[in-house]
C-alpha cells in the first residue's frame, strides 16, 4: 500500500491540516454522494498491526451509513418543500420559459436553486453565471421557439481559475473552466470540455473549444460581469473554506 498522502485524513493529525494543503472538493462530494473512496473502500485505513489479508477482508465487508448526506438534506430540503409562488408583472412568455428551463437542461428555477443550496452546504460556495447565446435571434418567435434567451451555469469552486475585485468590491475579472457535463447551456452551443471562459466588464473570451467558431473574444454589452456568488458564511474570502 502506498504511503503517498492523497486525502487530508491520511495525515493522521486531524482535519485541521486541510487548511495547509488546500481543499479536496472531490472528497467532500464523495462524502455526500457516497462515491469515490467510500464506494470502492479507498478511504479505509489499515490498523498499524493489520496485515493486508485482513485489511482486504474488512474492506470487502465494509458498511457505511451516510450521516453527512442526511444532515445536509435536513438543512436544504425544508426550504424547497413547497413550490415558490411567483407573480409575473408582464405577460412575457420568455420569462416563464426561463423559469421553467433555466439551464437548457429542462431544470426549473426552484430545482436549480436547490442544487445551488446543496453545493453551498457541501463545498462552501457556489457561483452562478448568467450567460446568453453568442448568436442573437432574428425574431421574437425564433427567440422563444429556439430558446435563445439567457441561461444559468452553476460553477463549483474548483472551476474558478482567476478572479479580481477592485477597491470598491466590484468583480472586474472572472475566469473559469467549464465542463459540458454540468453546463447544459454550453452544451447546446456545441462547446466541449476544458473550455476556459474569461469575463471582464468589456469583453468575454472563450478558449479551448474544439469548435473553432466558438473561440474568440466577444463584446460584453452588459458592462458588468453577471456572476452571483453564494455562500453561507460571513467571511470576505471570495472562495471561502468549506
Image (cartoon, helix red, strand yellow):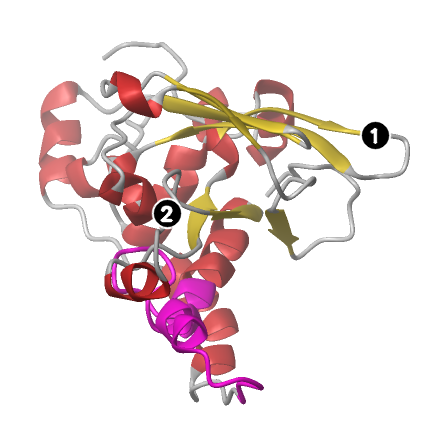
Q: Which residue is mark 2?
A: 31
Q: Is residue 137 left or right of residue 113?
A: left
Q: Is residue 109 magenta?
A: yes
Residue 110 in the image: state x and y as whole percent. Answer: 42, 73
- Where residue 179 sits, quadrant-wise, is top left
Name the quadrant of the N terminus: top left
- At x 17%, y 29%, the residue is 55
Q: Is residue 56 left or right of residue 8?
A: left
Q: Is residue 167 left or right of residue 86?
A: right
Q: Secondary structure at mark 1?
A: loop
* Residue 223 in sight here: yes
Disc 2 vs disc 1: which is toward the camera? 1
Q: Which mark is residue 196?
A: none
Residue 172 in the image: state x and y as whole percent. Answer: 72, 31
Q: Which residues are drawn in magenta?
A: 87-114
- At x 35%, y 72%, the residue is 97
Local packing at callout 1 (Cα closer than 10 Å; few below 14, some 14-19, many 20+) is: few
Q: Is residue 15 magenta?
A: no
Local packing at callout 2 (Cα closer than 10 Å; few below 14, some 14-19, many 20+) is: some
Q: Which residue is mark 1?
A: 166
Q: Is residue 41 above or below residue 164?
A: below
- Name the N-terminal-most of marks 2 and 1: 2
Residue projecting furthest to the right = 167
Q: Nearer the viewer, residue 201 or 103?
A: 201
Q: Secondary structure at mark 2?
A: helix
Q: Nearer the viewer, residue 172 or 111?
A: 172
Query: How many circles with numbers are drawn on the protein?
Result: 2
Q: Is residue 35 above or below residue 207?
A: below
Residue 147 in the image: state x and y as whole percent. Answer: 30, 59
Amino acid at each position: 500500500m502506498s504511503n503517498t498522502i492523497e486525502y487530508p485524513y491520511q495525515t493522521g493529525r486531524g482535519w485541521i491540516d486541510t487548511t495547509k494543503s488546500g481543499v479536496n472538493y472531490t472528497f467532500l462530494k464523495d462524502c455526500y454522494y457516497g462515491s469515490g473512496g467510500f464506494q470502492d473502500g479507498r478511504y479505509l485505513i489499515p490498523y498499524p498491526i493489520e496485515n493486508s489479508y485482513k485489511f482486504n477482508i474488512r474492506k470487502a465487508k465494509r458498511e457505511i451509513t451516510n450521516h453527512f448526506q442526511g444532515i445536509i438534506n435536513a438543512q436544504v430540503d425544508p426550504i424547497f418543500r413547497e413550490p415558490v409562488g411567483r407573480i409575473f408583472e408582464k405577460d412575457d412568455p420568455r420569462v416563464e420559459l426561463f423559469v421553467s428551463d433555466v439551464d437548457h437542461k429542462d431544470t426549473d428555477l426552484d430545482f436549480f436553486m436547490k442544487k445551488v443550496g446543496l453545493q453551498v452546504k457541501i463545498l462552501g460556495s457556489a457561483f452562478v453565471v448568467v450567460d446568453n447565446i453568442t448568436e442573437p435571434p432574428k425574431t421574437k418567435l425564433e427567440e422563444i421557439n429556439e430558446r435563445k434567451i439567457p441561461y444559468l451555469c452553476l460553477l463549483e469552486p474548483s472551476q474558478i481559475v482567476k478572479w479580481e475585485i477592485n477597491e470598491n468590491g466590484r468583480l472586474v475579472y472572472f475566469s473559469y473552466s467549464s465542463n459540458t457535463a454540468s453546463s447544459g447551456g454550453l452544451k447546446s452551443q456545441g462547446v466541449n470540455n476544458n473550455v476556459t471562459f474569461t469575463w471582464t466588464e468589456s469583453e468575454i473570451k472563450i478558449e479551448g473549444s474544439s469548435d473553432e467558431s466558438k473561440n474568440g473574444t466577444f463584446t460584453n454589452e452588459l458592462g458588468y460581469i453577471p456572476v452571483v456568488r453564494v455562500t453561507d458564511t460571513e467571511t470576505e474570502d471570495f472562495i471561502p473554506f468549506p
